[in-house]
Image (cartoon, helix red, strand yellow):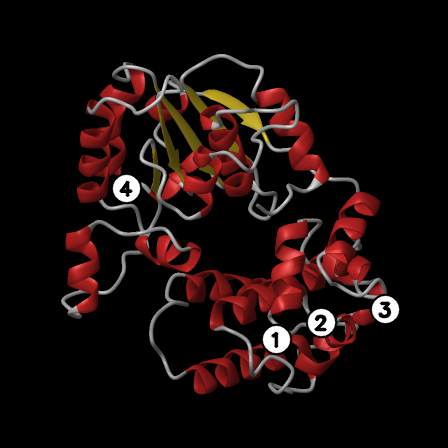
């Protein structure tokens, strides 16, 4: 079992002491909500829990590690379940295998109904049953309403953990039925030390952490996607020259996120503010606020269709061309 990051371990030790049947772990992405939620579920189900949480060795812990614990159900968008190795219901897997449909990017009401059936059966241990929903805001209105009554009065000893990146998108009636836990931000030196332990070179940890807005999970994902600190710091100037090569090998969602960060910092600089994701020296000078504002709106619109199966090379080339245009309009 992969050890939790130190700031998550501290939160876990606090959460396992609390009573209640439903917890909402909320905060921005990249702070480890899913990892903390799974660790909390493991600690509650563990047969030999320690002061640090689950023992990691008992049959219950093994069941979670191999994604086959009979008293734990994980409810996520099908795309994320497949990426993380969680099994889909038999019918859903068959539909996807036979190409009748693509894996869902939201939490489907059919999956929620199956989950409610799971809560009605008797658990195999005194620890009861655990449900982990992540990211909870990806329940649509129908799915969330299907959960409400069971979340308020769960059958037997059933507990819920909702991991969430955007709590404001949850139904107020869902939020009101949960104990809220605000995810903690790690200190920069602590996050850099953890990134180093994950294999990120020490010369890059600080730049990538800044590039990720202080979110260590996102910084690690950027490194694993092949983004180097030198490439990142050169990105704004490269975009101002229309160089698409610096982003060409990355997924469209990561490219779009990178463009949005450049645009954010350029807007900040244009009104005398401090950049968040770059250093001031990395940014081109003199771009017009109006041009940057229009570019920002266009990027927000592009985010709605970033997962569409466009020809990625042409899409990124168009985005970079638009970035060059916005950055070259001088005051």
243 vs 252, nearest the viewer: 252
234 vs 200, nearest the viewer: 200
Disc nearest the viewer among 4 and 3: 4
Compared to residue 269, the image places residue 320 above or below, namely below
Tell me the distance, in whole angstroms, between the alpha carbons under discs 4 and 3.
43 Å
Judging by the rendered image, the residue that carries numbered circle 1 is 326
User: Pointers 4 and 2 in contact (CB under 8 A)?
Assistant: no
Judging by the rendered image, the residue that carries numbered circle 4 is 140
Q: Earlier in the sequence, mark 4 or mark 2?
A: 4
Q: Which mark is residue 281?
A: 3
| Left or right side of 14 for 89 | left
Q: Earlier in the sequence, mark 2 or mark 3?
A: 3
Give the secondary structure at mark 2: loop
Q: Quadrant of the N terminus?
A: top right
112 vs 253, nearest the viewer: 112
Compared to residue 65, the image places residue 267 above or below, namely below
Q: Earlier in the sequence, mark 1 or mark 2?
A: 2
Q: Earlier in the sequence, mark 1 or mark 3?
A: 3
Query: Which residue is found at the position 66% from the left and 80% from the top?
Result: 239
List x then y, in percent, for residue 161.
43, 29
Judging by the rendered image, the residue that carries numbered circle 2 is 287
| Left or right side of 151 for 142 | left
Query: Which residue is found at the position 25% from the left and 26% from the top?
Result: 119
| Left or right side of 252 for 111 | left
């Amino acid at each position: 079992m992969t050890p939790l990051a130190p700031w998550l371990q501290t939160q876990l030790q606090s959460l396992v002491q609390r009573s209640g049947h439903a917890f909402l772990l909320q905060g921005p992405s990249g702070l480890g909500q899913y990892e903390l939620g799974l660790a909390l579920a493991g600690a509650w189900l563990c047969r030999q829990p320690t002061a640090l949480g689950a023992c990691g060795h008992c049959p219950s812990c093994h069941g979670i590690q191999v994604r086959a614990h009979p008293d734990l159900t994980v409810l996520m968008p099908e795309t994320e379940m497949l990426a993380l190795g969680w099994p889909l219901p038999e019918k859903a897997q068959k539909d996807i295998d036979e190409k009748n449909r693509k894996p869902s990017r939201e939490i489907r009401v059919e999956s929620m109904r199956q989950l409610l059936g799971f809560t009605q059966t008797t658990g195999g241990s005194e620890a009861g049953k655990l449900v982990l929903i992540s990211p909870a805001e990806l329940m649509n209105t129908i799915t969330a309403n299907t959960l409400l009554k069971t979340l308020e009065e769960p059958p037997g000893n059933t507990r819920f953990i909702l991991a969430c990146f955007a709590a404001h998108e949850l139904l107020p009636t869902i939020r009101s039925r949960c104990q809220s836990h605000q995810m903690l931000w790690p200190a920069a030196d602590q996050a850099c030390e953890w990134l180093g332990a994950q294999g990120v070179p020490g010369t890059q940890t600080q730049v990538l952490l800044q590039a990720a807005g202080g979110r260590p999970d996102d910084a690690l994902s950027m490194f694993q996607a092949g983004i180097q600190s030198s490439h990142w710091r050169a990105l704004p100037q490269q975009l101002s020259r229309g160089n698409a090569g610096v982003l060409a090998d990355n997924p469209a969602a990561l490219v779009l996120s990178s463009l949005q960060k450049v645009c954010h910092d350029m807007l900040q600089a244009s009104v005398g503010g401090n950049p968040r994701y770059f250093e001031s020296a990395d940014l081109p000078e003199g771009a017009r606020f109006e041009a940057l504002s229009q570019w920002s709106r266009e990027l927000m619109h592009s985010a709605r269709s970033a997962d569409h199966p466009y020809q990625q090379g042409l899409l990124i080339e168009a985005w970079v061309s638009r970035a060059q245009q916005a950055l070259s309009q001088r005051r």
